[in-house]
């Protein structure tokens, strides 16, 4: 069954990614409703939403042209496509709301970090719903609370990928500034993204812009060493990561280990990011929210224990993040993380 171009779309989780994707859809005339937290709803109702692309192009969507609510019953009523953009820890709860309020033939797309969210949705949603794994490769930063209009700015490159399980879906979700493509190996893509996302925690702990952090070889080596742990675990479980942004995790790890002068030459694409770019976990720290560490480094540690593989660095990073959650944000040193005692 083809998906109509005017299908009603719900963005379930209007955080940075949800607002960016939904904002582009709304700006292109799609029928979009945001299911949001009260703060986001209030700010968007007051002053609308501004979306800024990687090249600096701004799209301002007035409040009267946006549909936003905190009520899931209202949001999901008549939905055809549901884009799930909540934190991984809220996936099961969101599945319950979708089951209760959304039409039984809804198409549900996970645009979340981590490798298991589509499986959680499939397990908890009716079989009549189509669940599709997706991957957002780029970073988005959001304006500070209370700064109006609420603004989301894309800071890195990449194309959204989704499973090819619903004919015409990618075309319906594509806008002039936000292409969406299908991929035949989404699980491999998600594992490749997970390896890259091991830097989310490091960037948050560093309290540095991404470009500044990645220009520092000490931080790059720490990331590469973590990736080495992850690749061993994946190999033990016969998991093969696909290339993300044209590079495999194994090759990316070697690039990260290069001295600065070579890294700058080889990794121009990696460093071609907005100087304001930060990881989503840094945003969690700055807003006092629980992080997704259990679904990033935590997945590596869990799988490692099944095969008795040591992952000391991942465990140290988890311990540092746990200690930092809910505390005033501060800058950690690489040596502090490497020397962290794990109880």
Image (cartoon, rainbow, N blue to C red):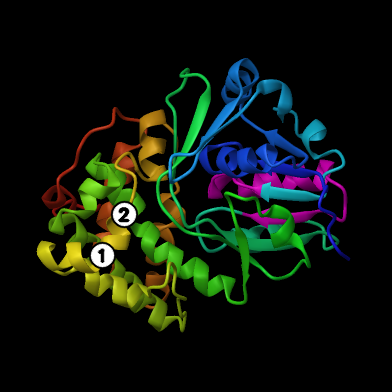
User: 10 Å neighbourhood of mark 1: few (<14), some, or many (≥20)?
Assistant: some
Q: Earlier in the sequence, mark 1 or mark 2?
A: 1
Q: What kind of element bears circle 1?
A: loop
x, y (%) of residue 229? 29, 71
Q: Residue at x 35, y 40 (%)?
A: 282
Q: Which of the pair 226/318 is nearer the observer?
A: 226
Residue sitting nearer the eye, 136 or 131: 136
Disc 2 element: loop
In the image, is residue 327 part of the stretch drawn in magenta? no
Residue 320 placed where, x, y %?
27, 46
Question: Which residue is nearer to you in this view: 13 or 61?
Answer: 61
Q: Is residue 207 above or below residue 301?
A: above
Quarter residue 254 falls in: bottom left
State which quarter of the image contains the N terminus.
Answer: bottom right
Determine if residue 308 is in view. Answer: no
Q: Is residue 301 left or right of residue 135?
A: left
Q: Which residues are magenta?
A: 84-110
Q: Give residue 123's quadrant in the image.
A: bottom right
Residue 10 percent coordinates (x, y): 73, 42
Kindly identify the residue that appears in the image at 40 percent across and 45 percent down: 155
- The disc placed on residue 225 is none
For the residues labelled 1 and 2, say whether their Cβ atoms are less than 8 Å apart. no
- Left or right of 143 on screen, residue 184: right
Left or right of 340, for residue 328: right
To which residue does mark 2 refer? 272
- Percent x, y for residue 85? 60, 46
Question: Could you say which is closer to the camera, residue 150 or residue 241?
Answer: 150
- Badge 2: how crowded within 10 Å, few (<14), some, or many (20+)? few
Q: Quadrant of residue 116?
A: bottom right
Q: Where is 181 relative to 293, above or below?
A: below
Task: Give the Cα distance between marks 1 and 2.
Answer: 9 Å
Q: Which mark is residue 267?
A: 1
């Amino acid at each position: 069954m083809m998906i109509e171009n005017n299908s009603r779309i719900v963005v379930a989780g209007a955080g940075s990614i949800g607002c960016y994707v939904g904002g582009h859809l709304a700006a292109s005339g799609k029928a979009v409703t945001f299911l949001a937290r009260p703060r986001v709803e209030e700010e968007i109702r007051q002053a609308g939403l501004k979306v800024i692309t990687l090249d600096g192009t701004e799209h301002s969507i007035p409040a009267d042209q946006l549909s936003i609510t905190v009520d899931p019953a209202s949001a999901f009523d008549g939905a055809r496509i549901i884009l799930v953009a909540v934190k991984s820890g809220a996936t099961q709860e969101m599945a319950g709301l979708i089951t209760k309020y959304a039409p039984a033939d809804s198409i549900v797309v996970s645009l979340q970090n981590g490798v298991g969210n589509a499986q959680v949705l499939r397990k908890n949603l009716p079989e009549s719903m189509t669940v599709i794994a997706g991957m957002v490769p780029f970073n988005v930063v959001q304006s500070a609370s209370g700064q109006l209009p609420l603004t989301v700015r894309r800071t890195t490159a990449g194309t959204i990928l989704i499973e090819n399980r619903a004919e015409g879906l990618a075309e319906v979700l594509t806008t002039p500034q936000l292409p969406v493509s299908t991929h035949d190996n989404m699980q491999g893509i998600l594992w490749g993204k997970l390896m890259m996302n091991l830097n989310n925690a490091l960037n948050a702990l560093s309290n540095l812009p991404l470009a500044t952090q990645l220009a520092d070889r000490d931080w790059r080596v720490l990331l590469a060493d973590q990736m080495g742990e992850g690749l061993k675990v994946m190999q033990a479980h016969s998991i093969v990561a696909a290339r993300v942004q044209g590079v495999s995790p194994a090759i990316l790890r070697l690039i990260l280990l290069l001295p600065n002068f070579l890294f700058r030459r080889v990794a121009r694409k990696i460093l071609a990011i907005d100087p304001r770019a930060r990881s989503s976990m840094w945003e969690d720290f700055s807003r006092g929210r629980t992080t997704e560490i259990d679904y990033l480094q935590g997945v590596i540690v869990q799988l490692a224990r099944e095969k008795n593989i040591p992952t000391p660095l991942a465990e140290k990073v988890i311990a540092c993040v746990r200690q930092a959650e809910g505390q005033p944000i501060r800058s950690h040193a690489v040596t502090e993380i490497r020397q962290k005692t794990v109880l």
